[in-house]
């Protein structure tokens, strides 16, 4: 029993050097992602604070969503074949739960992502003159419970996109960063006004550390994304258990033979078959004359039967009189 436990423990660290290398590069990728994502938010806020350059809230939300979505798209595509391009402890947790990430690498990735977020936020602060304005916080009128559930659902959406587009291997897997970046963009359009649209504990933790935790309810950005990881992983597990690919087979194929046939040709073929029904039935007859003879014979048989019935009735009437 002790030997078996020792074997399992040692197997966890068989690739420890590779895990450390991947974690170091994940640190670089996370800092790279947040430098440009948070940098765009910082630039948007700084420009909005300039006299005479007041932009609408919708424009600012769209700008923030675009910065974060495109920054993730580019960063994930660059690091996709290096570390997986996760940059998010909550995505790492979901991959651990579904078995795509080993425990040791998960721990190292989480540390690298949190430290990388601090480095990215520190770079934004040092490269810009204005105070750091990229912290996530609950908008006035949004209570902590609402914040937790908003973060849970948008994190689940991001996790599902990662699992279905990147973890699942198919024809479009090399383009997974595009779909994942667009998912982040869409979630920001919804939630950036209410919670800041974190979806990533590291994204909230890094700026909070650099700026000294200036806003309350920071715990929301730990609990909400954590629950979103569980929800997204549970949904993906359910899909796998019920063999989702059998519900719509050949959807990801590139075989042109699986494409729908020509609709016009199909309609013509259907109409042609329906028109051929009557000739096929008449083909059993050798000609119109035989049809006429058959009808005449049928009429004669009916007439004879009627006569026999009448004779039988008369005979019964005579017997009854006697």
Image (cartoon, helix red, strand yellow):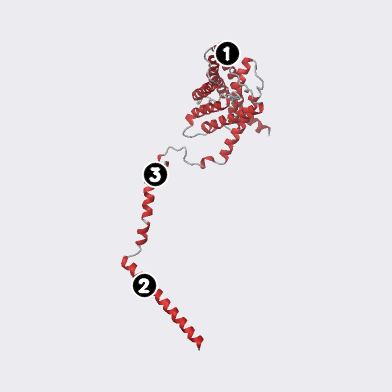
Label 3 crowd bin: few (<14), some (14–19), many (20+), radius 10 Å: few
Q: Residue under label 3, please give it.
A: 263
Q: Quadrant of residue 188?
A: top right
CB-based contact (under 8 Å), mark 3 and mark 1: no
Q: Quadrant of residue 99?
A: top right
Mark before the other along the chain sequence, 2 or 3: 3
Q: Residue furthest bottom?
A: 322
Q: Residue furthest right?
A: 2
Q: Nearer the viewer, mark 2 or mark 3?
A: 2
Residue 249, compared with residue 36, is above or below; it is below
Q: Residue under label 1, please give it.
A: 125
Percent of width and height locating residue 145: 66, 28
Disc 2 to disc 3, how far (Cα)?
48 Å
Mark before the other along the chain sequence, 3 or 1: 1
Label 1 crowd bin: few (<14), some (14–19), many (20+), radius 10 Å: many
Q: Nearer the viewer, residue 268 or 115?
A: 268
Disc 2 to disc 1, how far (Cα)?
106 Å
Q: Residue furthest top?
A: 129
Mark before the other along the chain sequence, 2 or 1: 1
Q: Nearer the viewer, residue 201 or 108?
A: 201
Q: Nearer the viewer, residue 59 or 12?
A: 59
Q: Residue at x 36, y 55 (%)?
A: 276
Percent of width and height locating residue 11: 61, 29
Q: Residue under label 2, please give it.
A: 297
Q: Nearer the viewer, mark 3 or mark 1?
A: 3
Name the element at disc 3. Answer: helix
Label 2 crowd bin: few (<14), some (14–19), many (20+), radius 10 Å: few
Percent of width and height locating residue 197: 58, 25
Q: Nearer the viewer, mark 2 or mark 1?
A: 2
Q: Residue at x 40, y 39 (%)?
A: 256
Name the element at disc 1. Answer: helix
């Amino acid at each position: 029993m002790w030997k078996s436990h020792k074997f399992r423990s040692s197997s966890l660290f068989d690739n420890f050097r590779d895990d450390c290398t991947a974690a170091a590069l994940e640190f670089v990728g996370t800092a790279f992602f947040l430098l440009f994502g948070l940098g765009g938010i910082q630039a948007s806020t700084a420009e909005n604070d300039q006299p005479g350059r007041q932009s609408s809230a919708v424009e600012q939300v769209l700008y923030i969503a675009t910065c974060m979505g495109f920054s993730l798209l580019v960063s994930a595509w660059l690091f996709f074949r290096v570390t997986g391009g996760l940059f998010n402890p909550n995505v790492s947790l979901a991959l651990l739960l579904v078995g795509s990430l080993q425990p040791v690498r998960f721990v190292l990735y989480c540390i690298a992502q949190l430290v990388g977020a601090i480095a990215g936020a520190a770079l934004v602060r040092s490269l810009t003159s204005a105070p750091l304005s990229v912290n996530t916080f609950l908008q006035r009128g949004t209570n902590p419970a609402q914040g937790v559930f908003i973060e849970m659902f948008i994190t689940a959406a991001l996790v599902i996109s990662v699992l279905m587009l990147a973890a699942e291997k198919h024809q479009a897997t090399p383009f997974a960063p595009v779909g994942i970046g667009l998912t982040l963009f869409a979630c920001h359009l919804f939630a950036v006004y209410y919670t800041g649209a974190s979806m990533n504990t590291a994204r909230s933790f890094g700026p909070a550390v650099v700026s000294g935790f200036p806003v309350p309810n920071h715990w929301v950005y730990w609990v909400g994304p954590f629950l979103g990881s569980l929800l997204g992983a549970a949904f993906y597990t359910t899909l796998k258990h019920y063999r989702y690919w059998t519900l719509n087979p050949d959807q990801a194929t590139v075989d042109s033979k699986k494409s729908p046939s020509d609709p016009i040709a199909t309609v013509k073929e259907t109409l042609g078959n329906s028109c051929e029904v009557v000739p096929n039935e008449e083909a059993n007859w050798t000609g119109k004359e035989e049809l006429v003879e058959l009808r005449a014979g049928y009429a004669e048989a009916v007439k004879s039967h009627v006569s026999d019935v009448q004779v039988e009735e008369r005979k019964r009437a005579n017997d009854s009189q006697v």
